[in-house]
């Protein structure tokens, strides 16, 4: 797969089929992930794959409680506003994300694979999230969808780590929990605020020098390579 296709179309794919992900595919995802950079090449990371139904069944109620707490706390006001103004594009977008995130929580046990990433001595997360994103890009290249989530660690990290047998006294923290599965929907280019609204040149607030109104990569037309599109 063209690297740009992976970069542009690796979306949060939370609606997935229960079909297992073959071990060789999992191996390629992890082997790509551990090529990522870390500060001083410290590689202070551990990756815990979870596919055992019993373990998922123990984590699911924690995940579901965490997502309920997320809606009731950080997102409460924004969701109230979005529900009151559902036709506003920003509200519609937030309600779509909420519905998708809730779907993942409701179907936690049928997600075939989770990758739970742990780091140590990395308060910024700068030495773990490159590896996590590489795993997601590698999964994309295999046709496997993924969604990075932080809610489990945020609300029930200690209990989840106990279930997973993580040693409590070695400084490991749960960076995130990534779901993986073959998507039920289609891949699309991620919608984002355009470059010229979020980038500057030389001085804060100064025009970056180009305006990009449409993504610079788009899906190739049938039979035509992406580089010619
Ligand atoms: C640090 C971080 C934490 C996230 N936590 C959650 C989460 O707890 N639950 C969830 O469903 N999605 C979570 N997401 C996924 C985002 O909601 C998603 O990346 C964003 O909505 C963009 O989705 P899109 O790529 O499909 O447009 C998280 C993403 C990041 C980067």
Image (spheres, grey):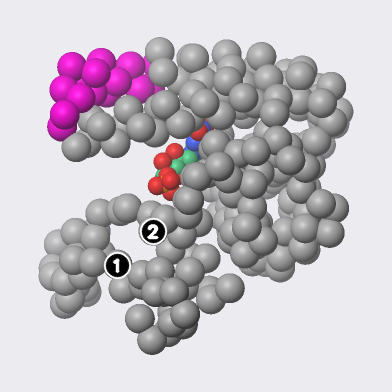
Looking at this view, is 58 or 145 the one in front?
A: 145
The residue shown at (51%, 20%) is 67
Residue at which label 1 appears? 215
Report the quarter where the C terminus lies: bottom left
Horizontal placement of 179 versus 93: left or right? right
Relative to 149, residue 108 above or below? above
Horizontal placement of 24 versus 92: left or right? right
The residue shown at (35%, 22%) is 75
Visible in this render: residue 32?
Answer: yes
The residues colored magenta run 73-88
User: What is the residue that sits farthest to the bottom in this orientation?
Assistant: 228
Question: Mark 1 near mark 2, Cβ–Cβ under 8 Å?
Answer: yes
Looking at this view, is 189 or 166 the one in front?
A: 189
**Count of marks, rendered view:** 2
Looking at this view, is 199 or 18 the one in front?
A: 18
Asked if residue 86 is among those painted magenta in the image, a careful observer would answer yes
The residue shown at (71%, 65%) is 32
Image disc number at residue 139: none
Q: Position of residue 137 (x, y in %)?
A: 59, 61
Image disc number at residue 189: 2
* Callout 1: SS: loop
Q: Position of residue 61 (x, y in %)?
A: 66, 14
Q: Position of residue 84 (x, y in %)?
A: 18, 17
Looking at the rendering, which quadrant does residue 85 occupy?
top left
């Amino acid at each position: 797969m063209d690297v740009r296709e992976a970069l542009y179309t690796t979306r949060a794919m939370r609606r997935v089929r229960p079909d297992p992900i073959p071990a060789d595919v999992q191996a390629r995802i992890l082997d790509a992930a551990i090529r990522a950079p870390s500060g001083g090449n410290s590689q202070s990371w551990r990756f815990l794959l979870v596919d055992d139904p019993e373990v998922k069944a123990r984590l699911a109620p924690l995940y579901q409680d965490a997502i309920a707490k997320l809606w009731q706390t950080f997102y409460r006001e924004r969701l109230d506003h979005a529900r009151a103004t559902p036709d506003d594009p920003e509200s519609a977008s937030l309600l779509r994300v909420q519905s998708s995130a809730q779907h993942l929580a409701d179907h936690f046990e049928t997600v075939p694979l989770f990758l739970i990433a742990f780091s140590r001595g990395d308060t910024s997360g700068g030495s773990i999230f490159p590896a996590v994103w590489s795993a997601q890009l590698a999964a994309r290249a295999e046709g496997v969808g993924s969604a990075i989530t932080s809610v489990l660690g945020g609300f029930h990290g200690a209990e989840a780590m106990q279930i997973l047998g993580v040693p409590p006294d070695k400084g490991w923290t749960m960076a995130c929990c990534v779901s993986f599965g073959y998507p039920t929907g289609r891949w699309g280019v991620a919608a984002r605020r355009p470059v010229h609204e979020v980038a500057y040149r030389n001085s804060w607030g100064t025009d970056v020098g180009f305006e990009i109104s449409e993504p610079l990569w788009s899906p190739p037309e049938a039979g035509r390579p992406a580089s010619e599109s």
